[in-house]
Image (cartoon, helix red, strand yellow):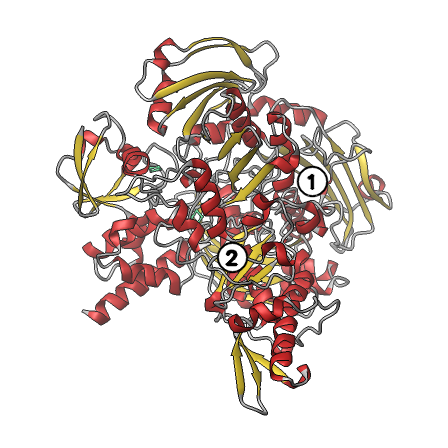
Amino acid sequence: MATILINGQSREVAADPSTPLLWVIRDIVGLTGTKFGCGIAQCGACTVHLDGVPVRACSTLLSSVGSKAVTTIEGVAASDAQVVQQAWIEQQVPQCGYCQSGQIMSAVALLEQKPSPTDADIDAAMQGNVCRCGTYLRIRAAIHRAAEMKRASA
Amino acid sequence: MKHFMNQLQPKASEPSSVSRRDFVRVSLVLGGGLMITVAGCGPNGEELADGPSGGTSLSPNAFVRIDPQGRVTVISKHLEMGQGAYTGLATIIAEELDADWSSVSVVGAGASDTLYGNSTIGGMQGTGGSSAIANSYDQHRKAGATARAMLIAAAAKQWKVNARELTTEPGVVIHAASERRAPYGTLVSAAAAMPVPATVPLKGPKNFRYIGKSKGTPRVDGVAKGNGTAIFTQDVKLPGMLTALVAHAPLFGATVKSFDATQSKAVQGVIDVVQIPTGVAVLADNFWAAKLGRDALVVEWDTSVANTAGSKEIMASFHALAGTKGMPIRNDGNAEQAIAGAARTVEASYEFPFLAHAAMEPLNCVVDLRKDGATVYNGNQFPTIDQAAVAKVCGLTQEQVTMETVFAGGSFGRRANPKSDYVVEAATIAKAIDGRAPVKLVWTREDDMGAGYFRPAMLHVMKGGLDKSGNAVAWWQRVIGQSMMAGTMFESKDGKDASSYEGASDHVYAIPSVFLDTHYPKVGVPVQWWRSVGHTHTAFAVEAFIDEMAQAAGTDPLAFRRELLAKDPRRLAVLNLAAKESGWGTPLPAGRARGIAVHKSFDTYVAEVAEVSLVGGTPRVHRVTCAVDCGIVVNPDIVRAQMESAIAFGLSAALYGKIDIEGGRVVSNNFDRYRVLRQREMPTVDVHIVPSTEKPTGVGEPGTPPIAPAVANALLALTGKPTRSLPFVG
Ligand code: FES
Ligand code: FES
């Protein structure tokens, strides 16, 4: 039995320490906004934050989480993510939507680090998040828009 | 849909106490549209009368329902897999109903060819061929207008006025003379008692509020897909449900000889291990236990009849057929003679690899088998085909199988499998454990990409002839590749498979002699349609070869096309529009060139100009200018989004897409070895829509075919050398 701090709540989870965090989140905690796409840290669909840093949950073992705060798409709205989600709607980003939780988690972390990201910053931060529907242009536009909205409200 | 999703959405803190059967009933009642299938009744009128919160709903037809709160539920006969079908269909209904867009939600329809058939695929229910809007436009306008007419009739009766004096604004019936207004919800129960009119007037396009407008109808699934609440098959959770992973054969056509599950069953959480025709299934109470259980299985495979050929050998076998006569498809004039007598000839062969669909959501399917029936939760692209297949496996009648359609995390054709492959696998596992628990079959990415049903590998062999003044006089083409229709219900009796030559045999370049024939070699790799089907390769062969002929003629490729397309105004119009908007003919920075391609697929015309440079010998696509003519446009922003999407999808395949098979084994079975387009490689895309009053056609696929040849043609302009083998990188 391990204890993890997820979306601000402490949860006991009955799982082997070698279980990937993704499956702890989805099957044990029961939050399904974090997606399974590849299982080998190649697609970013499973992106969550550990103490605010984006990680691929499919390749993060439960044992390595320790006391770090886990934030998923269900918990991220409490932060600045609302602005990002609003920009996502303005730009009508999602198509099938399956990659979008991961995209948004990566985008939120980028904007925390770089409030005014350049295109190159966006390329670097988002390169690990695949979108097979090809929403990349709108993701880029939405990140710029979210940055603008954050600056305006700052 | 929102209610349904809330119901399905697992709560982190409170474990569900609803029983399995309660769950199904509760979610169905809340889900509204889903009630149709479980209640075993058609959604016509009274049988569906009870809305979610009591009172009578207005359900004049199978596509729209309005409850006493004025909430409008559109029942979508098409799967939402990213292409925007839910929003597009709802836009059409909302237009004629004059609904308030914020009151509109959409649910997936149940399975019924009778109610939800698609006229573009012979009346079968299904999502494909870029047909959602094309086959629904008239039908859904009528459905919305009917509901509106009944609301107006109810108001006229209540107010004792002539219906002709009444008008509507979004969500409200208005009698201007007496300044009376009635929100739709207040009229619903009276309207439900009105006769359903046989004919209804439709709006004139100049009165459209939503159709053709860029704002006003944002995607109905946009919010749920940005906050993690959208429910995909992968997220469906039923009480007591088990997760199943299957150890699949390493080679196509191999079967289980024997297996030892001792180690597997020792894994904590593994509940059962069962042999099925496609392998050995491990059932566990969560994914990871099933995965560890599968890893621990020892399976011996019978490979005696399995495919052991690799992709290289398969392509070599196609080349061996290139000199042999095939099945004739088109023969105008005498191409061979014209080539023999031509002043100049051009020859090329174009090679296309196997491609995976690689939708973001790996394939999966939930089957809840009970004694008296079964419920399938899935991104159902062919609901009635899948329903029949599940019924057969489970020994049920088709009516006993309920199809619940949830969002699909992409598909690109893969979830429309004529053999219902993964759906049947899920049902087979449920049957193997006698329905003791609902089963969620999950394929890992490796299962998904290793299972085949690829876009077939293809070879096009081309010859062309030019006269002394550089006019094209002959075109000769031989297409070699597996038939994707063979062995399916879509196989044609004469042995011809249009998916090998559609978009090539019917090319409209005005050349006096045109010949095309086909070979359909048998290959032991399962193949299937992939976004834009045959056009994925035919558009490349035709459009790249036209550029090679233009080069041989010493003519600008745009001018060369214009000359030959004079009789096809819509094609010419998109070609000219894309050229103009791209700045065709104007100078570019050193090291950059433009390439152009135009193609019609699914009755939609698209031209694309790609601006390309070489960075360290690798193509870099900077900008794509796209012109599209899809007739009447329902949602311009979705048209733009689908062009962007189709360009990204086609470019991903053109640059990197390739399934490598070695010794019969699929080696590129995850994103580390099957490279896909990422953020940095995405070009700028400018989409220009041709205004039109022609009937609406689709946009999900037609943006894909022109991008690969546009890039190849830019490379030809840049380097003088043709690109004849895909993908371009690696
Ligand atoms: S599922 Fe974790 S990166 Fe793909
Ligand atoms: S929206 Fe479908 S994969 Fe990104």
Q: Quadrant of ligand 1?
A: top left
Pointers 2 and 1 within a single chain: yes
Q: Residues within 10 Å of mark 1 (few under 14, many from 20)?
A: many
Q: In this view, does A150 lie above or below B458?
A: below
Residue in view at x 68 percent, y 58 percent: B561
Q: Is residue B682 above or below residue B458?
A: below
Look at label 1 and name its amino acid.
Ser
- Output the chain of dot 2: B
Look at label 2 and name its amino acid.
Val
Give coordinates of residue B534: x percent, y percent: 66, 42
* Mark 2 within 8 Å of ligand 2, using the beta carbon: no
Q: Quadrant of residue B688?
A: bottom right
Mark 1 = which residue?
B499
Q: What element carries label 1?
A: helix
Give coordinates of residue B326: x percent, y percent: 78, 31
- First reached walking from the N terminus: tag 2 or tag 1: 2
Q: In this view, does B30 lie above or below B66?
A: above
Identify which residue, B71 or B697, lies in the foreground.
B71
B226 left or right, relative to B542: left
Residue in view at x 56 percent, y 18 percent: B277
Residue in view at x 37 percent, y 9 percent: B262
Question: Which mark, residue B398?
Answer: none
